[in-house]
Image (cartoon, grey):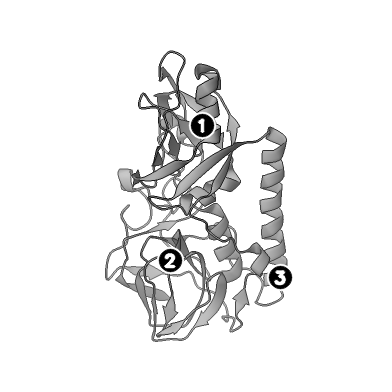
Amino acid sequence: MVCTVIDPGTLSTIQDKGRTGYRAFGMPVSGVMDRYAFTMANILAGNSGNAAVVEMTMRGGRFRFPNEAYIAVCGADMQGKLNGEKIKNWSGFHVPAASVLAFGYAISGCRTYLAFRGGIAVPQAMGSRSTYLRAKLGGIEGRALQSEDVLEVARTEALPRELNELAYSLAPRYANDPQLRVILGPQDDLFTEYGIATFLNRAYTVSHRNDRMAYLLEGPMVAHKTGADIVSDALCPGAVQIPGSGTPIIMMADCQTTGGYAKIATVISPDLAKLAQAKADDTVRFISCSDAEAVAALMTEKKCYEQASSVSLTKINAPV
């Protein structure tokens, strides 16, 4: 089964959870920016948890389906239409043969995930199908999708026909002023008390310098005690660096593995999805939380997956 790209949109790439085990060699994890929307898309499509999907950014693409398929769409509302008829976001549904699926600009959120039942069958690179653009690795030739690309979808048995809609309580509403929970450290001792208070009590604006590597924010300066530079150490997605300019840089999926700026805090993983759905000129605020609160947030996220999976299995066939 195949799907042909008519128009790739602004930036569409093939992604899964990312490649792990190679950070010591300088290779980022990469993978999806919004773990929650990605996971829900695969659940609604009836896939295992790490099937490769299409991640679309800001403006979605158009796709031709010569054969029937079962797909799911989750994340930003890109005003999707199937053969000219509006589709339900946060749902899985049957696509008849000779159909065209089209998306527009995101009117809520920033990134949309298109999952195919069976997953996208591209070769793995270092254990992942994710596209890492800077190294031209994974996906299709390590690049963003282009017109006339053909997406091979793994074979599945008989496809479901039922609409598989996510429960309303499990579908997030994307705000243009998200609050991000953070755990202070590991170098919060390198900032003044006033600097930490500024970071936690003032709003910051998402700059136009944001991508899959990092989100650069604009706003009040966060004061260091002596300077921004440290001996380079490990970086991970969610780490909040404060360079000499005093404004935060938040590491995202494609972030480098080490860095030499002091890190005031780390955004907890369940909240990175909120930032991944933020656009330029949106505002963010940071809220300090404890390790226990971060673990509780992660457990809540996992319970949402379990709830969605249990409902999904009653509507469509068992996961492939």
Residue at mark 1: 199
Secondary structure found at label 3: helix
How far across and how far down the image is residue 206, in percent?
40, 45
Mark 1 or mark 3, which is nearer the start of the sequence?
1
Mark 2: secondary structure: loop
- Judge whether residue 270 can be spotted in this image: yes
Task: State how far apart marks 2 and 3 are (Cα).
Answer: 28 Å
- Residue drawn at x 42%, y 28% is 221
Residue at (58, 81) in percent of width and height: 158
Residue located farthest toward the top when viewing the structure as drawn:
226
Q: Is residue 266 left or right of residue 261?
A: right
Crowding at label 1, few (<14), some or many (≥20) Cα neighbours within 10 Å?
A: many
Q: Which is closer to the viewer, label 2 or label 3?
A: 2
Q: Considering depth in this image, is 131 or 59 the residue closer to the camera?
A: 59
- Between the C-alphas of marks 1 and 2, the distance is 29 Å
| Quarter of the C terminus within the rendering | bottom right
Tell me where residue 80 appears, x and y as whole percent: 43, 75
Residue at image location 45% in from the left, 44% down from the top: 253
Q: Position of residue 67 (x, y in %)?
A: 42, 83
- Residue 311's label in the rendered image is 3
The answer to whether residue 320 is seen in the rendering is no
- Residue 259, quarter of the rendered image: top left
The residue where tag 2 is placed is: 107
Image vertical order of residue 60 relative to residue 239, above or below: below
Task: Tell me the quarter of the image containing the N terminus.
Answer: bottom left
Q: Amino acid at mark 3?
A: Val
Q: Nearer the viewer, residue 149 or 300?
A: 300
271 relative to 203 in the view: left or right: right
Query: Which residue sits at x=68%, y=58%?
Result: 304
Q: Is residue 33 above or below residue 169?
A: above
State whether residue 126 is above or below residue 111: above
